[in-house]
Image (cartoon, rainbow, N blue to C red):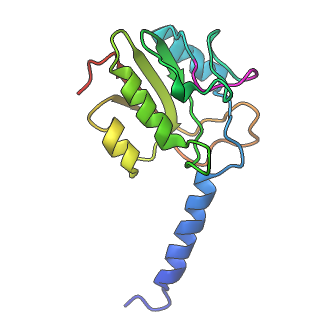
Amino acid sequence: MFRGLCYGCICGRAARMNKVLLSSGKDDWETPQEFFAKLDREFQFTLDPCANDNNHKCNRYYTELDDGLSKSWGGETVFCNPPYSAARKGKPGQADWIKKCYDESKKPGTTVVMLIPARTDTAAFHKYIYGKAEIRFVRGRLKFVGAKYSAPFPSMVVVYRGGRQG
């Protein structure tokens, strides 16, 4: 019935594809300005907690050395395009940033808007996003500033509105 189909090969191919989708060798891709500007018109961002001196989108921003994960974002309107990689030795990963966005959004007067891959199968998605935030799926694939090609994954914008979500 499934002659010639090797489940090991399918699993191996899926694992290799996952590795490609989860790692680009770079964790500081800059959000396309036009995409950011549209969100900024809606939210009027005051803080970019996950940036560097070249790709920040707000006048107030934290670099990796500043460690935005350790700072309070209370009272801010935050735009966060976090690293997309998994945590590795001594370096937080995307799930850490998702949790931080969720936790900070519970503070009074704090709105957090996050741009991340649309990975709806992850534990972080189900624990910190699904049913707790507004989710906007991005049509098509974003082409980040400096990238040769569009992202190999779909993206979503996650909106936490100042403690008013579930």
Q: What residue appears at the point 46 percent right and 23 percent down from the top-left corner?
A: 113
Quadrant assignment for the N terminus: bottom left
Q: x, y (%) of residue 105?
A: 37, 21
Q: Can residue 135 be seen in this view?
A: yes
Quadrant assignment for the C terminus: top left
Q: In which quarter of the image is residue 106?
A: top left
Q: Which residue occupies the foreground of this view, 32 or 104?
A: 104
Q: x, y (%) of residue 115?
A: 51, 31
Q: Which residue occupies the foreground of this view, 127 or 35?
A: 127
The tally of labels here is: 0
Q: Is residue 128 above or below residue 87?
A: above
Q: What residue appears at the point 57 percent right and 25 percent down from the top-left corner?
A: 68
Q: What residue appears at the point 60 percent right and 51 percent down from the top-left corner?
A: 88
Q: In this view, does 76 lie above or below 13?
A: above
Q: x, y (%) of residue 24?
A: 68, 49
Q: In this view, does 80 lie above or below 26?
A: above
Q: Main secondary structure of the magenta part?
A: loop
In the picture as drawn, the residue positioned furthest to the left comes out as 166
Q: x, y (%) of residue 28?
A: 68, 35
Query: Is residue 53 in the magenta section?
Result: yes
Q: Can residue 158 be seen in this view?
A: no
The residue stretch that appears in magenta: 48-54
Q: Which residue occupies the foreground of this view, 95 or 150?
A: 95
Q: In the visual, does 84 lie left or right of 63?
A: left
Q: In the visual, does 34 lie left or right of 72?
A: right
